[in-house]
Image (cartoon, rainbow, N blue to C red):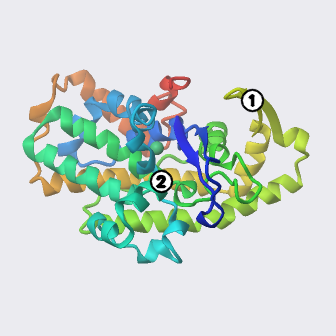
Amino acid sequence: MRVRRQKLPFFSVIAGALLIISFSSWGFLVHRTVGQLAIYQLPAPMKVFFWKNRDSIVSQSVRPDVRRNTDRTEFPRHFIDLEAYGDSAGWKMPLDEPAAIQKYSLDTLHKYGYVPYVVMAVQKQLTEAFRKGDRDSILFYAIDLSHYIGDANVPLHTSWNYDGQLSGQKGIHALWESTVPDQLMDGYRLRDGHKAQYLSDPAAAIWASVRHAHMQLQQLFEQEREASKETPDTVKYRMVHRYGKDMKVYTTAFAKVYGARLGTMVNDQLLRSADQIADFWYTAWMDAGRPDLDALLAASFSRKDKKNCRMESKAYRKNKLIEKQLLLARRYEGWE
Ligand SMILES: [Zn+2]
């Protein structure tokens, strides 16, 4: 679960008016899905290690969200409110964290979020883990990295109107990143032909994704307004009792109408996340000098494993992971 402190724009901050709001994340379903999809895009020397550890990669991909429950410093690592950093901030902010701290101060980054810098920091840790040949650290950082890259590709993680609270569309965060993909995933394309590519400038790549995500916002909000015009409030919302009070949340029926209006937006962002995760993993491994990962396997890659890995990869290539019940994320549905 994501827990985010609700903020008002700095020009209208009311002292003491901070509320704690909970969301589900990029949905847990999507975070778990993109890690699995990235595995099939890796080159042979990496694939076996990642495939053998696919259960951990999938099941633990939401760990950074869970960590927020016990670690307050975790909270701003999942988003960046670009508007808070000034006009066209996505195009103007420094690519590296020290320069950003100098320009805006560490407090500002902790207040308005700094996910692209977190991605780069974890990428560095992953590269170091590869260099040391430390199996547990490789997995730990590869999993964390998959999560933060996923978050950086969610449009509502790049805006201070992150839950539509400033535009009368409250609840749109969970609607877009959880309810819509939960409802429509079966019809998604889970492969776009991408193979892991070496990134000569990973910081530029993650910033390009943040900008791309941010540019989806206008459409994301607009389509909610359009879907609302054709949906009566009695169908659009349902009441739930949460955090000791009654709240309105979007219905699954509305999510289907809204999801159809969005076209391929959610699906495209899901694929971008998976592709980028594969690129970042691959780049860290290359930068570490292409260490032998097969030597780090806890258990051997048996003949049966080989057969299963080949069968899954084929299902992935033919976009049949869901149809053949090979999407591991489905096994963890309901787990939080
Ligand atoms: Zn997150």
Residue 48 makes an appearance in the image: no
Decide if residue 22 is on the left or right side of residue 202. Answer: right
How far from the left and from the top, in percent, is residue 229?
88, 56
Determine if the C-beta at disc 1 is less than 8 A from ligand 1.
no
Q: Is residue 334 left or right of residue 64?
A: right
Q: Residue under circle 1?
A: 245
| Mark toward the viewer: 2 or 1 | 1
Which residue is the site of mark 2?
79
| Badge 2 element | loop
Neighbour class for label 1 at 10 Å: few (<14), some, many (≥20)? few
Would residue 213 appear left or right of 248 to someone viewing this image? Answer: left
Q: Position of residue 304 (x, y in %)?
A: 26, 22
Residue 67 in view: yes
Q: Is residue 191 above or below residue 225?
A: above
Question: Which residue is found at the position 61% from the left and 46% from the top?
Answer: 18
Whole-percent x and y of residue 106? 35, 60
| Mark-to-mark CA distance, 2 and 1 | 27 Å
Mark 1 or mark 2, which is nearer the start of the sequence? 2
Amino acid at the residue labelled 2: Phe
Residue farthest along the front direction in this orientation: 15
Does mark 2 have its CB less than 8 Å from ligand 1?
Answer: yes
Instruction: Establish if 90 lies above or below 285.
Output: below
Residue 319 is situated, as x and y percent measured from the top left of the image, at: 49, 43
Relative vertical location of residue 186 with respect to residue 260 in this rendering, above or below: above
